[in-house]
Image (cartoon, rainbow, N blue to C red):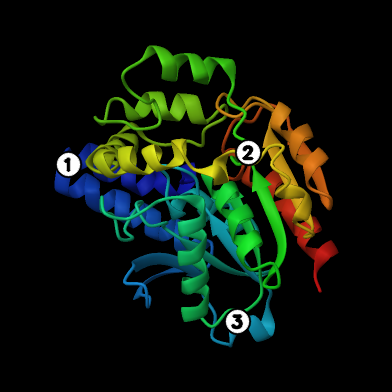
Amino acid sequence: MQLKHLFLFIVCSFFLSGCEDITNWAYEKGLAMEKNRAGLKDQILTTADGITWHILTSETSAEPIAEKEAVLLIHGFSADSSNWVRFANELEGDFFFIVPDLPGHGETTRNLDLTYTMSAQATRLLTLMDALQIQHFHVAGNSMGGAISLALAQQAPQRVLSIGLIDSAGLTRQTEGFKTILADSNSNPLIPHTAEQFQATLQWAMEEPPYLPSFVVDIMGKKKAANAEVAEKVWSDLLEDPGMMLEDKNVLPSIQIPTLVLWGREDRLLGVDNVGAFLEELPQSRAIVLDGIGHVPMAEAPGKSADAFRAFWREVRP
């Protein structure tokens, strides 16, 4: 998600040309500027399990873990690493960030043969962290990324310093409105099949979306639509995944790791009633609810979200 002042030159390019090649260039250039401003660089690497990852990591000339605590940031369903750029910008220099596109998303391996359960994704992320030689780290996840964070904490509790659950799945208490549209429609608003349908995706996901020029929304929509078939496979795997249905399963009480639950009160997908349920089941949890914010607080309110996590990570640091 991009800030308005960094798109001024892109908007000029758009009006000067109207050319698809130029607008695509402008989109990529604007995103690159955002990453640079946040101190993030792109990396491509292939891990031992055969996954080719696109990740963002903090720029550093020193050994990162010796100098700063590592933080793994996990995006939600049908999203990608760019969702975290504004959040990371608010904390630039304070932590060493690892921000991957999950398998099935973004520029990381996407195919119909993979299993996209929470457990499978957590295992892949641990393999990625091994490849990066990062032993201990904080983890924070949004939506599906939160459920993956919980699976990761179950698989490697000795490696996880803290957990951040941002409008997290896992209990998956969907709002009545979201359940109704899923039941009454042949399409999932989170899986756009055309660029135009991506507008509805944004409306469901965000109460206070960041400024995005219309041509940027169009490019993003085309990218999401191009991945619709894989997204359908990911969603299908989620529907039957025990990792998305943890309530009253005696799983969460066993997670003895400090946890911050951050929620947007206006979330249209996973209601704010999830907060109390997480607090009840996770023994070392605390919560912050942001008024006027929807399902993606780190993109909608990056400053407030970053302040909450900065204080939390400082409090729980080893």
Which residue position holds label 3? 64
* Contact, mark 2 vs mark 3 (Cβ under 8 Å): no
In the image: residue 179, left or right of residue 293: left
Position of residue 311 relative to residue 187, above or below, is below
Q: Residue at x 46, y 38 (%)?
A: 240
Q: Nearer the viewer, mark 2 or mark 3?
A: 2
Q: Amino acid at mark 2?
A: Asp
Which residue position holds label 2? 167
Q: Position of residue 245 (x, y in %)?
A: 59, 38
Q: Position of residue 202 (x, y in %)?
A: 44, 30
- Callout 2: SS: loop
Residue 58 visible, this orientation: no
The circle drawn on residue 17 is 1
Position of residue 18 relative to residue 282, above or below, is above
Residue placed most toward the observer, 78 or 85: 78
In the image: residue 307, left or right of residue 192: right
Picture quarter with the C terminus: bottom right
- Callout 1: SS: helix
* Contact, mark 2 vs mark 1 (Cβ under 8 Å): no
Q: Residues within 10 Å of mark 2 (few under 14, many from 20)?
A: many
Residue placed most toward the observer, 71 or 188: 188
Q: Residue at x 32, y 37 (%)?
A: 232
- Callout 3: SS: helix
Q: Position of residue 224 (x, y in %)?
A: 30, 40
Number of numbered callouts drawn: 3
Residue 191 visible, this orientation: yes
Q: Quadrant of residue 182?
A: top left
Q: Residues within 10 Å of mark 1 (few under 14, many from 20)?
A: few
Q: Position of residue 248 (x, y in %)?
A: 72, 37
Q: Residue at x 73, y 45 (%)?
A: 250
Q: Residue at x 55, y 43 (%)?
A: 242
In the image: residue 232, left or right of residue 38: left
